[in-house]
Amino acid sequence: MARYIMRRGIASILVIFLVSIFTFLLIHLQTGDALTVKLRQRLPEEQVQALRAQLGLDRPLWEQYWDWLSGVLRGDLGRSFFREQEPVWTRIKAALPVTMELVGIALVVSVAIGVPVGVVSAVRRNSFLDQMGRLFAVIGLAVPVFWLGTVVLTYGGIWFQYSPPLTFSYFWDDPLSNLEAMWLPGLVLGYNLSAINMRITRSSVLEVMRQDYVRTAWAKGLRERAVLVRHVLGNSLIPVVTILGNQFVYVVGATVIVEFLFHLPGIGFVALESISTRDYNLMQGTVLVIGVMVVLANFLIDLLYARLDPRIRLGAVASS
């Protein structure tokens, strides 16, 4: 097991390193730079070159990357080019709780809706409830998050006079105001995930209900509720638990769109803002944090899979 963990840890570090390189190259291949966007006016060429040299934008790319990477290894993500040299980590630290809260709400919604609908759909197979549950799942899988969010904002404003709050309050400052801003985007994200959970729960419950021990429980004359609670749900929900890790990875990426639509000051919103302003350090810092979150989640998922199924780690050791 220790050898398997070491292999996965080295692979995770390599992925983060490659992500940092590709992000650095892609953002520097754009036309213009942070200074061009920030100035928004014509200045004498000598003054522009002096400012570019002051920011270090005139040096070769490999030198700029090395300076940034060495700072990251020391725990310094650099300073924002566009926001008057504000520390990048200060901006990310303020945005990170927003994204994590949104991810948490989306995952809770996905389980609270998807699992009960999946269980009912499996227990009442081929009934009207089953047909409606499957329709619910198909729509959730087919509708893109950005389209659903746009529809909710548009018709929410027309029918219910809803609009995202102009100011954002953290939960520890004003819980009611915070939930007012977070519940709807969390529901939009969670609906898509709940459709996946519904399909997996339905398939898993149907498979478990065909097992011999479940038939024996029915033959003993146990009530339906007792059979479901004691014999079916515990075993059928294992796939749902394992897929939650993959859903975390997905929803972290989806928050970029939702935070922009609902004006939430999370990591995704900061990333989009840094792209539009060519803020190299801020963009690299946000992508690095998102990449670390995704890689860490995948690493924990791999460990969970290896814990639940020893054949995975044994196969990895045998292949080496």
Image (spheres, helix red, strand yellow):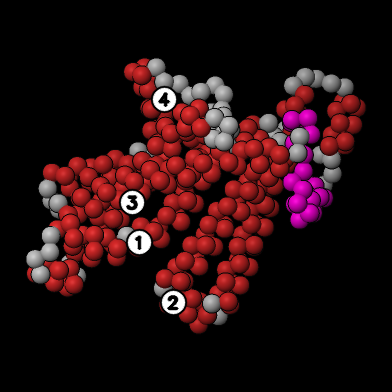
Q: Which residues are magenta?
A: 61-85
Judged left or right of residue 175, residue 236 is left
Please tell me which residue is depicted at 57% across the width and 58% down the height of the picture. Answer: 296
Q: Which residue has dot 3 on it?
A: 197
Q: Is residue 313 visible?
A: yes
Residue 123 sits in quarter: bottom left
Query: Which structural element holds mark 2?
Result: helix
Label drawn at residue 239: 1
Mark earlier in primary sequence (3, 1): 3
Q: In the rendered view, tell whether residue 319 sits above or below residue 25.
A: below
The location of residue 154, given as percent across then percent down, is 40, 22
Q: Quadrant of the image for the N terminus?
A: bottom right
Q: Which residue has dot 4 on it?
A: 153
Q: CA distance from mark 4 to mark 1?
A: 34 Å
Q: CA distance from mark 3 to mark 1?
A: 9 Å
Q: Amino acid at mark 1?
A: Pro
Q: Amino acid at mark 4?
A: Leu
